[in-house]
Amino acid sequence: MESKNNNRGRFSMWMYFGVGILILLLLVWLTIADFWGDTDVNAIVPIF
């Protein structure tokens, strides 16, 4: 029983670590896009 709780805690730690890395990469990506002036959302996929 104790090993299941230990594995669940370890998984949760890695999940938080991964989510934090993804948020950090998103912020870096948005900062670079803003610095280059490439923030035109209409240039992604024009629907009409």
Image (cartoon, rainbow, N blue to C red):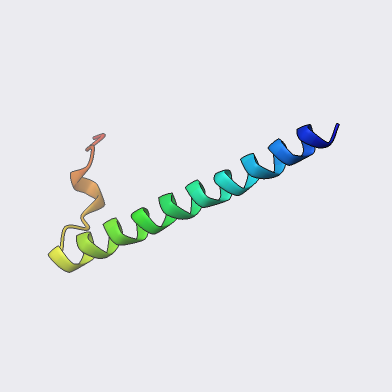
At a point 23% along the width and 35% down the height, the residue shown is 48
x and y percentages locating residue 19 in the rendered image:
50, 49
Taking the image as shown, residue 12 lies to the left or right of residue 39, namely right
Q: Looking at the image, which is closer to me, 21 or 35?
A: 21
Residue 44: image quadrant is top left
At a point 21% along the width and 55% down the height, the residue shown is 40
Q: Looking at the image, which is closer to me, 23 or 39?
A: 23
Residue 39: image quadrant is bottom left
Q: Looking at the image, which is closer to me, 26 or 8?
A: 8
Q: Looking at the image, which is closer to me, 48 or 26?
A: 26
x and y percentages locating residue 16 in the rendered image:
57, 50
Taking the image as shown, residue 45 lies to the left or right of residue 19, namely left
Seen as rendered, the residue at the extreme left is 36
x and y percentages locating residue 18 in the rendered image:
48, 47
At a point 64% along the width and 43% down the height, the residue shown is 10
Taking the image as shown, residue 6 lies to the left or right of residue 14, namely right
x and y percentages locating residue 41 in the rendered image:
25, 51
Picture layout, residue 39 above or below residue 9: below
Quarter of the figure that contains the N terminus: top right
Seen as rendered, the residue at the extreme bottom is 35
Q: How many marks?
A: 0
Taking the image as shown, residue 17 lies to the left or right of residue 9, namely left
At a point 21% along the width and 59% down the height, the residue shown is 33
Seen as rendered, the residue at the extreme front is 3
